[in-house]
Image (cartoon, rainbow, N blue to C red):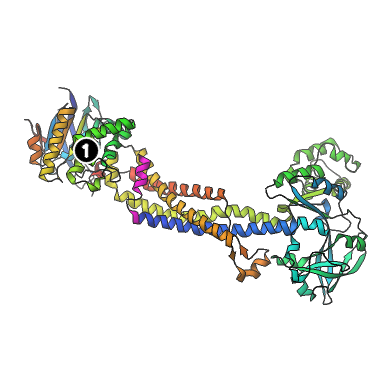
Amino acid sequence: MNKVIEISKLNKIYTETAVPVHAVNDLSLSFEQGEFAAIVGPSGCGKTTLLNLIGGLDKPTDGKILIDGTDITTFSIGQLTDLRLWNIGFVFQAYNLIPVLTARENVEFIMELQHKSKAERRARAEELLVAVGLADRMDVRPGRLSGGQQQRVAVARALASKPKFILADEPTANLDSSSTETLLSIMEELNRKEGTTFIFSTHDSRVMSKARRIITLEDGKVLSDKTL
Amino acid sequence: MIISIAWKNIWRNKFRSFVVLFAIAVGLVAGILSVAIMNGALRDRIKIAIKTEVGSIQLHRADFLNNAEPDKTMDNAGEIIKEIEENQDVIAVSGRLKLEAMINGGHGPRGAMVLGVNPDSEKKVSDLYSYIPDSLGGWFNTDLRNPIIISSRLAEKLKVGLNNKVQLDFVNKQGEAIAAIFRVCGIFKTNNSLYDEMKVFVENSTLQKILGFEENEFHQIVLLTKEDADLDSISTGLKRKYSAFSINSNTLQNLGNLKVDSAVIAYFTENQTESRLSYSFMQELLRESPVELSSQTQKDILRAFESGVSVMTWEDAAPEMALTSYWMDWLLYIFVGIILLALGFGIVNTMLMVVLERVKEFGMLMAIGMNRRRVYMMVVLETVFLSLAGGVTGIAISSILISWLSNSGINLVSLADGFNSMGYSTLIYPYIGFEDYIKIVIMVILTGVVSALYPAWKAIRLNPADAVRSE
């Protein structure tokens, strides 16, 4: 299959602390189109750092990250912003929706950044909100949605830009079991339907049980990489 | 959508936004109202000055202004008046004799400026007649011999009343001292105590009889123009037509049959600007002439020009008011500018709090692909909207207050002595022009933009990876 992400000999050392922290240590990995993968491991093992590096939110100390064959470690801030806008979807632990916009507007927002037409934005937002089961909550602001519903809007927003892959950092950490179950089913369905690669960092066994690949990190290194 | 988000964002913390909005509104109301009151007082003062004291435009013989001697009357004054009357923008024209005199009511003499007027035409250029209460006589509607109108202030100082006699001591055209008895036929009171103390009015015909002036012999021609008339253009037209200082290549040759060489003509022609056509300017030109002129030639040139006409707008005739009017324009910027500067610090503080509270949100926006320029623009827009909301509220309240006060007026009668000594009315009608409101809106927008610079810079300096995980 087509490799979307290729990481080789990636290192990230934080030197701002009293003792330098080797958060990602000589790590090499790759992800193919359509994967549904979970990165797991204890707190401080480097899961979030790895996602931040893949997502262009942080720069590695050395090593390479190829997205569709292009090394992004040499990109400027502007290029990384564009890369995130057009190629990567983000789902955050705390949902991070824009509180003054409705669910529909939150989903449309990223497409507006892409200068999509109003009609296209509206159609895509409605399609995705229906897909995540929020057809009747489209014009409601995040403050009036439950945590599970907000995270479903966040998933719809992440998919709205038609990204190559979605990075989800502990997406179920704030959700109850029923919401987690619903969210995972929706993401699985969208992964199958849209063919978008999903990469999670998680502690949650329910997420791990749905993942088709589990990468375990320890001290910034890959401890195991199992395809189920 | 960024505009919509920015607008909605300012209402996320309604209480805080209302506090800022209220502060801006109150500050602006205070500033605008202060400027409007000063503006209203000055406009009223200018209106009174034009309608009562100096007229819109005055014409004199050029050298009369430097040395107001009785013989310095204007040539062809009657013809000039007739020609000016034909101007569509001129409401009325009147000729005046203007003489320095001593006035005595029997309790000691005082200096006075005697204005010899034609009662009918004067009534059209000056509303001084309206300052004479019915109980204190009228505007020369009397059978008294040698009637005179004086102010109540002067009457008090001279200890005279209606129908009482006063003596005027003049110098006639020949330089001879002449004394004449006048009877008070009217007593006026304006809001300008200095004017009241100095000016007395008599009929032209009386002065002609006593001092030997001809019928159409005047020291001053006063004209009142329509309110919307372009004063500069009328004054320039009059200067071109009557002023001795309107120099062209023929003027110097023709005046007084002077023999002036072409270098002098070129020098005067090059240095002439319509706005500077004045007697003192002519003296300056002569002093600084690159071509050496003998003192006799200089005197000859000046003498030739002296008999010409000097044209002055009210701004030239009352330069202190023109200067105040000029400063009044700046006062708006200074007053509102200082208020907005102080408010600007409050806005910066508020927006810094906004950025601090929304670190996670800014991190998310940058993470999902919103570039720094847009994030910056969003913070700037929020600040401008917040400032504008306060600004518009302040302007709306101010305009309602000013509209109400401009009908009822603000009565400052308790400050009458101070106001009247400067010629200002104690009943002030605040005024501020539409263009001033536009200027204030622009200043508010600029305040918003400037206040946003630092908070917006703080927002775009955030690291999205850290910001998105912040608490």
Closer to the camera in the image, B418 or B411: B411
Closer to the camera in the image, A137 or B192: A137
Side (left or right) of B76 relative to B322: right
Residue lying at the far top of the rendered structure: A1
> What number of labels is visible?
1
Q: Is residue B83 visible?
A: yes
- Determine the residue positioned at 65% across, 70% down: B417
Q: Is residue B4 magenta?
A: yes
Q: Quadrant of the C terminus of chain A?
A: top left
Give residue A189's quadrant in the image: top left
Question: Amino acid under label 1?
Answer: Ala
Closer to the camera in the image, B163 or B426: B163
Magenta residues (range) = B1-15
Looking at the rendered structure, the secondary structure element under dot 1 is helix
Side (left or right) of B262 relative to B409: right
Q: What is the crowding at mark 1: few (fewer than 14 residues within 10 Å), some, or many (at least 20)?
A: some
Q: Which residue lies under the disc numbered 1? A: A135
Q: Quadrant of the N terminus of chain A?
A: top left
Which secondary structure is most common in the magenta stretch? helix
Q: Is residue B419 magenta?
A: no
Image x and y of residue A145, in percent: 21, 46
Side (left or right) of B367 relative to B400: left
Side (left or right) of B241 relative to A182: right
Q: Chain of mark 1?
A: A
Q: Is residue B128 above or below residue B468?
A: below
Image x and y of residue B349, in percent: 37, 54
Closer to the camera in the image, B376 or A104: A104
Image x and y of residue B128, in percent: 75, 62
Q: Is residue A61 visible?
A: no
